[in-house]
Image (cartoon, rainbow, N blue to C red):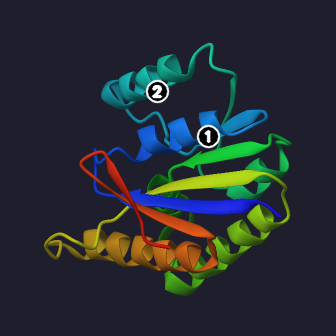
Amino acid sequence: MALIALITGGCRSGKSRYALERAEAAQGSRTLIATCPRLDDEMSERISRHQKERQGRGWQTIEEQTDLVGALHDTDSAVVLVDCLSLWINNMMYVDGHGVDEDFVADRCERFLEACHSREGMVLAVTNEVGLGIVPDNAEARRYRDLLGRCNQTVAAGADEVVFMVSGISSQIK
């Protein structure tokens, strides 16, 4: 059964860097499951920067925006890094529309955890903590915050470890 670690924190808190370094410190092959869609030039540039960061360091990449369970089954790597759950929830909202509610998200997270538990090695999942700021001023942003909050709670409950990142500093909270 895989060790599951959830790495959370605010935007630009060092989550991805921490997860990448932790994955590279582990033994065995590594796969990144990238959930970020290429929506515009700026996002494409961000993706390119992340790809260059991993270049020549033994990473395989699976780009999958919604089917994390399928992506987990598509790799036999010892270490899998999912970056990130925040965009996974966003993507499901736009693919599956208003049918995505907290029960839907909890179900998908439970399926994700089952797929993680069926593996050997390590699964690191990165997510944003969006519940520390002000209440969003529109219904769709509040819905996203609530859905991601449910995702984070569900995955954290099933994870072996939860790490909170602040200003590039990690704090293990589970």
Using the image, determine if residue 5 lies above or below residue 49: below
Between the C-alphas of marks 2 and 1, the distance is 15 Å
Asked if residue 93 shows in the view, the reply is no
The answer to which of 57 and 50 lies nearer the viewer is: 57
Q: Is residue 7 left or right of residue 1?
A: left
Please name the residue that numbered disc 1 is placed on. Answer: 23
Q: Residue 125 at x, y = what percent?
A: 56, 55
Q: Residue 77 at x, y = what percent?
A: 80, 40
Q: Is residue 139 left or right of residue 48?
A: left
Amino acid type at mark 2: His
Q: Is residue 153 left or right of residue 116?
A: left
Earlier-in-chain disc, 2 versus 1: 1
User: Does dot 1 land on a helix, a strand or a loop?
Assistant: helix
Q: Which label sits on residue 171?
A: none
Q: Which residue sits at x=31%, y=27%?
A: 42
The answer to which of 143 and 111 lies nearer the viewer is: 111
Which quarter of the figure is the N terminus placed in? Answer: bottom right
Asked if residue 65 shows in the view, the reply is yes
Q: Residue 101 at x, y = what percent?
A: 50, 81
Q: Which residue sits at x=50%, y=83%?
A: 102
Please name the residue that numbered disc 2 is placed on. Answer: 50
Residue closest to the far top = 56
User: Does dot 2 land on a helix, a strand or a loop?
Assistant: helix
Amino acid type at mark 1: Ala
Q: Which of the 4 image quadrants contains residue 45?
A: top left
Q: Which of the 4 image quadrants contains residue 64?
A: top right
